[in-house]
């Protein structure tokens, strides 16, 4: 597997799943731009771990208007041309329909900004550049959107905004795959269940219940996500464009 032809921007690349994606892509030869929100120290640690395969660190708060477009422009200015995008950054907040009005409104606004608007703006900017690259016969580009099993099956009643944002991102990914293939664009979606990161439940009862619904018996590891992203970016199976890859230990099968 070879990713030496890849210059990739990984959002939320300073920790957890994003860090694993950055490291695994670098392991197979990709050059990586690591995006982070505010923790420069964590981003620098990822950069140090992949050495010269890190071609940039960029801070951007994806909850702010225009953040996606700004991030793409910065990445290209710093280390372009970028020919691959991994939309990994995301947040999950309680948006309980039976809660108070402020929690509902604030949660929906923040989640949609980070989980949908920023990735959509990044995809849009990437598509424009990828079309120009294809016209110049330099190969188009690749997009991987990290969605969720909630994209397909929904989520708990107190997290509807998260499920809605990831469902919309999945629909966007399918649309890109269908509509931009002529421009040399490949687009893939991953739909993980629980991943063993700091976002996983820590309460023993909640943890036990979460694992009990997984036939494989455990959460996915971040290295599994990273490996699949690297495989998709390697161009070993371009006909999988548009596909959604479930990584959930058979807790949700279709």
Image: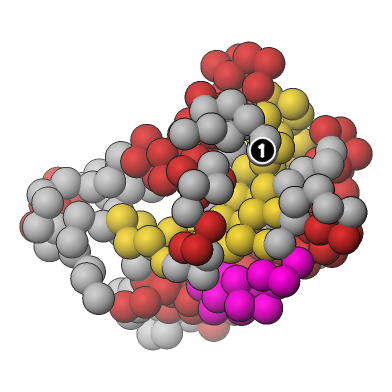
Answer whether residue 251 is visible to the viewer in this image: yes
Answer whether residue 37 is visible to the viewer in this image: no
Say whether residue 122 is left or right of residue 156.
Answer: right
Question: As displayed, is residue 216 above or below residue 160?
Answer: above
Say whether residue 210 is left or right of residue 227.
Answer: left
Which image quarter: residue 62?
bottom right
Give the total of numbered labels: 1
State yes or no: residue 178 in magenta. Answer: yes
Identified at 76% across, 36% down, the residue is: 58
Identified at 73% across, 30% down, the residue is: 57
Across and down, in percent, residue 61 comes to 73, 50
Question: As displayed, is residue 31 above or below residue 170?
Answer: above
Across and down, in percent, residue 7 comes to 71, 37
State yes or no: residue 98 in magenta. Answer: no
Say whether residue 118 is left or right of residue 222.
Answer: right
Across and down, in percent, residue 210 comes to 18, 57
- Of residues 129 and 40, the one nearer the viewer is 129
Say whether residue 153 is left or right of residue 252.
Answer: right
| Residue at the spot of label 1 | 6
Which image quarter: residue 131?
bottom right
Identified at 63% across, 30% down, the residue is: 4
- Of residues 12 and 189, the one nearer the viewer is 189
Magenta region, residue range:
170-183
Identified at 25% across, 76% down, the residue is: 254
What residue occupies the far front of the structure in this picture?
Answer: 137
Across and down, in percent, residue 121 comes to 76, 65
- Of residues 173 and 70, the one nearer the viewer is 173
Q: Find numbered disc 1 in the image and state the secondary structure of the residue it sits on.
A: loop
């Amino acid at each position: 597997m070879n990713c030496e032809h890849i210059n990739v921007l990984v959002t939320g690349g300073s920790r957890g799943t994003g860090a694993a994606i950055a490291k695994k892509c670098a392991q197979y030869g990709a050059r990586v731009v690591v995006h982070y929100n505010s923790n420069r120290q964590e981003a620098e640690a990822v950069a140090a771990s992949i050495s010269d395969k890190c071609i940039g660190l960029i801070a951007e708060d994806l909850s702010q208007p225009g953040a996606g477009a700004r991030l793409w422009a910065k990445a290209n200015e710093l280390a372009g041309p970028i020919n691959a995008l991994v939309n990994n950054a995301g947040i999950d907040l309680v948006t309980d329909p039976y809660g108070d009005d402020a929690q509902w409104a604030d949660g929906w606004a923040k989640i949609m900004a980070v989980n949908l608007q920023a990735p959509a703006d990044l995809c849009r900017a990437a598509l424009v550049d990828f079309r120009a690259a294809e016209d110049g016969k330099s190969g188009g580009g690749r997009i991987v959107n990290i969605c969720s099993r909630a994209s397909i099956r929904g989520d708990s009643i107190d997290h509807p905004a998260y499920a809605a944002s990831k469902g919309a991102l999945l629909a966007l990914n399918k649309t890109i795959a269908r509509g931009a293939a002529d421009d040399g664009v490949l687009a893939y979606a991953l739909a993980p269940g629980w991943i063993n990161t700091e976002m996983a439940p820590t309460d023993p009862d909640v943890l036990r219940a979460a694992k009990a619904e997984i036939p494989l018996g455990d959460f996915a590891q971040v290295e599994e996500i990273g490996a699949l992203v690297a495989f998709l970016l390697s161009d070993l199976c371009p006909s999988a464009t548009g596909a959604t890859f479930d990584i959930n230990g058979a807790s949700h099968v279709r």
